[in-house]
Image: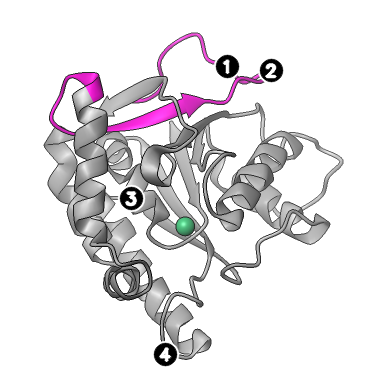
Amino acid sequence: MNILAIGAHPDDLELMCAGTLARYAATGHKVIMCYATNGNMGHMTMPPSELAQLRMTEAKRAASTVGADFEWINLPDEWVFEDEDTRRVFVDVVRKHQPQVVITHSASDYHPDHRAVYNLVFSATFLATVPQIGGPFETLAAVPSIYCMDTLGGFAFTPEQYVDITGVFDVKAKALAEHESQVRWLQEHDGIDVLDWMRVTSEFRGLQAGCRYAEAFVLEKRWPAVPAQRQLP
Ligand SMILES: [Zn+2]
């Protein structure tokens, strides 16, 4: 399968689904890690244009660590909206990668960019199948499944499916650590050690699922994209 994971900011996918993506990649599926924004607001002092470059470099390293291809949409951090132009950009990204499975944020997550990306993914995965909507890439043959990944802090999120990431936890931790600027920013701005925060979350989902470390997902139930068989690793 082609697995397209779309996160709002560089580090969201690493926090919430990089273990699952690493498992997909290790078993021969094609995985694309797509970053919607350039993360250019995530620093105390560095100018946004400079930070955007740094964050792209970090994200490329993280995707490479997971064994995924890299896609960079380059929207401005903190200002994602579902307008017509942005929706078309998402349609193009979906068509370019022809996914059977899309992983993205939950609609109930804490950050406005996360919620906006969820809405954009929901819209674009359907619109990508409509031939009369033009664009540079081939129309999608079928609406892909959407799996919503965990929310920050697990709020308003009741997991339905778990993926045991115990065997790839080190890969996930290394991918997250590639976002060096964010490890520092989250310490300074939010007072958290994001690497430890990720470990606790993975461990708690693992506790629920009866393994050491896990990631949790909810399948978006909408016609005609509900699979009859399990698609997660
Ligand atoms: Zn984020």
**What residue lies at 71% left-to-right and 58% top-to-bottom?**
81
Q: Is residue 166 above or below residue 192?
A: above
**What residue lies at 56% left-to-right and 51% top-to-bottom?**
114
Residue receiving disc 1:
226
Q: At numbered mark 4, what does the secondary structure look like: helix, strand or loop? A: loop
Q: Identify the amino acid type marked 3.
A: Leu
- Left or right: where 129 falls relative to 48: right
In the rendering, at what x and y percent does residue 26 appear? 23, 38
- Left or right: where 137 falls relative to 202: right
Rounded to the nearest angstrom, the CA distance separating label 4 from label 2 is 46 Å
Q: Identify the amino acid type marked 4.
A: Thr
Query: Which image quadrant is residue 75 in?
Result: bottom right
Mark 3 vs mark 1: give the one in front: 3
Question: Closer to the N terminus: mark 3 or mark 4?
Answer: 3
Rounded to the nearest angstrom, the CA distance separating label 3 from label 4 is 24 Å
Rounded to the nearest angstrom, the CA distance separating label 1 from label 2 is 7 Å
Which quarter shows the N terminus? Answer: top left
As for residue 211 lying within the magenta part, the answer is yes
As for residue 41 lying within the magenta part, the answer is no
Residue receiving disc 2:
223
In the rendering, at what x and y percent does residue 191 appear? 30, 67
Question: Closer to the N terminus: mark 2 or mark 3?
Answer: 3
Q: Is residue 68 in view?
A: no
Q: At numbered mark 2, what does the secondary structure look like: helix, strand or loop? A: loop
